[in-house]
Image (cartoon, grey):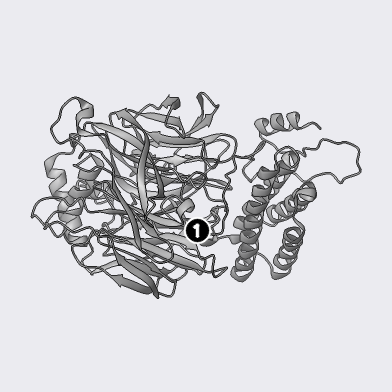
């Protein structure tokens, strides 16, 4: 059967063998069972030209949006069934998502905590605190924690953390490798004024082997990865953004402030967390309001920020426009580094979007406040824009497969297909998680989508409409089918997050609890439907690990099948597929062990299937991808039959 027919079969929603030869005596290939998603990659994937010696493979969230280029794409599967396991450190307001190392530890940085800490490490299984790094009370930390491999000690990793005043590198056991000053001075605390000294955390710059930090005020700094030496500083040229009008009634703001005051206290300047976060969301005098991207191929740095003061036609110290800047970081000839501006582009309506860079570095994706998803070249020349039905929110998820691009508005999740010079709409997600809940009138998306091997991880809010706003009373987390946009599974959550849908080790979810919409909802919840707001970290653990093993194995099988069709024409694509298949096999084997321990799969079957998967992994190479696909899909079907 020629490969062209294979693509037609995928479009029709089922999987068959793809082979350029017939009648070779090979056994009939296995098919994917109907209970598993029928999505599969087709053709060559987008591949970057960089190594994983320092940058970890994207098997979980190692930084804010998985890796340096912010694709929100992980190689692993999300468990099809989850349950809330624990909520810990509930007094912390955590606006940025947790990240993970390869030793089973989770890291987060709270915002203006009453307990004076800037970094906390937890055990991912138990939620027990491993250790914490002290803060200095007035120092706004809360940036995403960066995890990098230690190339001098294979298998080991290092944790990188930066606040406004200090930067540090730490071993997973809490040993500090270096701790240095940012050379930035905290301004005096002014009662009633919001601080703009927030740090968005570190990102990694491969060409200079440095870690780069970005602050809310536009300060950008580079440190030597190994020594912590401050090598270069710069300033994003944007001016503080004009705050958009807040549509919330003052009585709601006052009530929500009282709720967050009770749980989290106030900021050093006497402000409430609800008002602070709403102010940031609506502009609020910041130059930068989100994380930034680094293309690991070229080293280009992309920062979404406000435009320069005069760009809006009025020099008043404020900017009504957004802009995307690209920078380079190069040797300054004196043993240091210097930031140089390459290109910029303005956005009417502004942007709070984290830029996303495609795996090959050729495309940059942002959203603006007018509802457009915009694709740009690496030189920031517009390639296409797609107008959604409402203002776009958060960052854009970009898959290396099938030209898939995922975007969200306040209400919906959209799957677009990048056609090169235009984009087409594939689906708008069906969000019906609360369809049988009589207390919920309205359902809407609640967080950035994460692309996984077996679907799209999302958060869904439930509540009721007030004017043109959605009032959130309940929240949960689900898995969308990448093929159809329909929910495959859903679990009711404990608290809202404004960070990211963070897929952790072993296929579970961990959320950074940061109530905003639910704080507003709780404040006007006259019927007492909404639970009390809380902070901290929530774990949603995999249950029915046999189903997780099934999904991971099936995803590996269809990926191997497609890779076999491009191994000759696109060897770099097949090589990257092989790495992802190995990750999925490892995930499946761990899930099989847990399924056996939980009693969801008998020990003999789990051992047999694990052995079969180990055999595939040990022999996996470009020349036998079709045979590997058949073997993987055979295991997939055995797991499906054992449900």
Which residue occupies 50% across, 43% down?
298
Residue at 52% over, 38% down: 486
Image coordinates for residue 59, horizontal then vertical, percent = 54, 56
Q: In which quadrant is the N terminus drawn?
A: top right
| Quadrant of the image occupied by residue 540 | bottom left
Residue 157 in the image: above or below residue 249: below
618 w.r.t. 465: above or below: below
Does 422 sit left or right of 469 as displayed?
A: right
Q: Callout 1: 10 Å neighbours few (<14), some, many (20+)?
A: many
Classify 161 as above or below 217. Answer: below
Whether residue 410 is visible here, answered yes or no, is: no
Q: Where is the C terminus found, in terms of image quarters?
A: bottom right
Residue 152 falls in image quadrant:
bottom right
The answer to which quarter of the image holds residue 128 is: bottom left
- The answer to whether one can see residue 376 in this image is yes
Q: Residue at x 45, y 61 (%)?
A: 147
Q: Which of 337 and 50 is in front in this view?
A: 337
Above or below — where is 16 with respect to 140?
Answer: above
Badge 1 is on which residue?
508
Residue 629 x/y as whole percent: 75, 48
Q: In this view, does 537 lie to the left or right of 61?
A: left
Q: Is residue 257 left or right of residue 566?
A: left
């Amino acid at each position: 059967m020629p490969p062209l027919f294979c693509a037609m079969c995928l479009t029709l929603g089922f999987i068959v063998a793809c082979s350029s030869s017939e009648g070779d005596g090979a056994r009939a290939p296995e098919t994917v069972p109907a209970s598993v998603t029928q999505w599969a990659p087709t053709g060559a994937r987008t591949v970057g030209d960089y190594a994983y010696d320092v940058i970890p493979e994207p098997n979980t969230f190692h930084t804010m949006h998985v890796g340096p280029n912010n694709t929100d794409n992980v190689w692993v599967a999300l468990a099809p069934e989850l349950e809330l396991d624990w909520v810990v450190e509930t007094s912390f307001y955590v606006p940025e998502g947790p990240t993970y190392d390869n030793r089973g530890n989770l890291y987060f940085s709270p915002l203006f905590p009453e307990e004076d800490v800037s970094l906390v490490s937890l055990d991912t299984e138990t939620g027990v605190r491993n250790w914490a790094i002290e803060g200095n009370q007035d120092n706004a930390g809360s940036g995403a924690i960066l995890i990098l491999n230690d190339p001098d000690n294979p298998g080991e990793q290092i944790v990188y953390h930066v606040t406004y005043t200090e930067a540090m590198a730490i071993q997973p056991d809490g040993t500090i490798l270096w701790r240095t000053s940012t050379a930035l001075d905290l301004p005096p605390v002014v009662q009633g004024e919001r601080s703009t000294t927030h740090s968005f955390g570190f990102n990694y710059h491969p060409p200079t082997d440095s870690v780069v930090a970005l602050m809310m005020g536009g300060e950008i700094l580079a440190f030597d990865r190994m020594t912590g030496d401050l090598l270069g500083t710069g300033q994003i040229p944007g001016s503080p953004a004009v705050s958009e009008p807040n549509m919330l009634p003052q009585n709601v703001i006052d009530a929500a402030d009282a709720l967050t005051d009770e749980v989290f206290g106030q900021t050093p300047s006497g402000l409430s967390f609800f008002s602070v976060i709403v102010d940031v969301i609506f502009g609020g005098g910041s130059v930068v309001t989100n994380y930034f991207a680094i293309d690991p191929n070229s080293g280009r740095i992309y920062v979404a920020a406000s435009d320069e003061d005069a760009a809006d036609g009025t020099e008043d110290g404020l900017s009504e426009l957004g802009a995307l800047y690209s920078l380079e970081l190069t040797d300054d000839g004196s043993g240091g580094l210097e930031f140089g501006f390459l290109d910029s582009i303005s956005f009417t309506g502004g942007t709070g979007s984290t830029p996303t860079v495609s795996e090959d570095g050729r495309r940059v994706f942002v959203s603006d406040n007018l509802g457009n998803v915009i694709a740009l070249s690496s030189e920031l020349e517009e390639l296409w824009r797609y107008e959604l039905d409402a203002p776009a929110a958060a960052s854009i998820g970009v898959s290396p497969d099938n030209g898939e691009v995922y975007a969200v508005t306040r209400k919906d999740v959209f799957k677009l297909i990048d056609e090169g010079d235009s984009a087409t709409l594939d689906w708008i997600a069906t969000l019906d998680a609360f369809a049988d809940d009589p207390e919920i009138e309205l359902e809407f998306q609640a967080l950035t989508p994460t692309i996984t091997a077996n679907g799209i991880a999302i958060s869904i809010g439930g509540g009721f409409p007030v004017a043109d706003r959605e009032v959130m009373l309940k929240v949960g987390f689900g898995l969308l089918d990448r093929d159809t946009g329909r929910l495959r599974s859903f679990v009711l959550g404990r608290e809202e997050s404004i960070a990211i849908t963070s897929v952790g080790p072993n296929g579970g979810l961990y959320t950074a609890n940061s109530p905003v919409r639910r704080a507003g909802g709780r404040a006007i919840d006259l019927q007492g439907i909404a639970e009390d707001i809380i902070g901290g970290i929530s774990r949603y653990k995999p249950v029915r690990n046999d189903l997780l093993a099934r999904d991971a194995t099936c995803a590996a099988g269809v990926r191997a099948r497609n890779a076999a069709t491009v191994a000759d024409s696109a060897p770099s694509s097949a090589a990257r597929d092989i790495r992802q298949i190995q990750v999925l096999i490892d995930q499946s084997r761990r899930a099989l062990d847990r399924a056996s321990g939980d009693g969801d799969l008998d020990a003999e079957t789990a051992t047999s299937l694990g052995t079969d998967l180990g055999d595939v992994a040990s022999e996996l190479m470009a020349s036998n991808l079709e045979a590997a696909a058949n073997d993987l899909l055979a295991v997939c079907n055995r797991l499906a039959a054992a449900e």
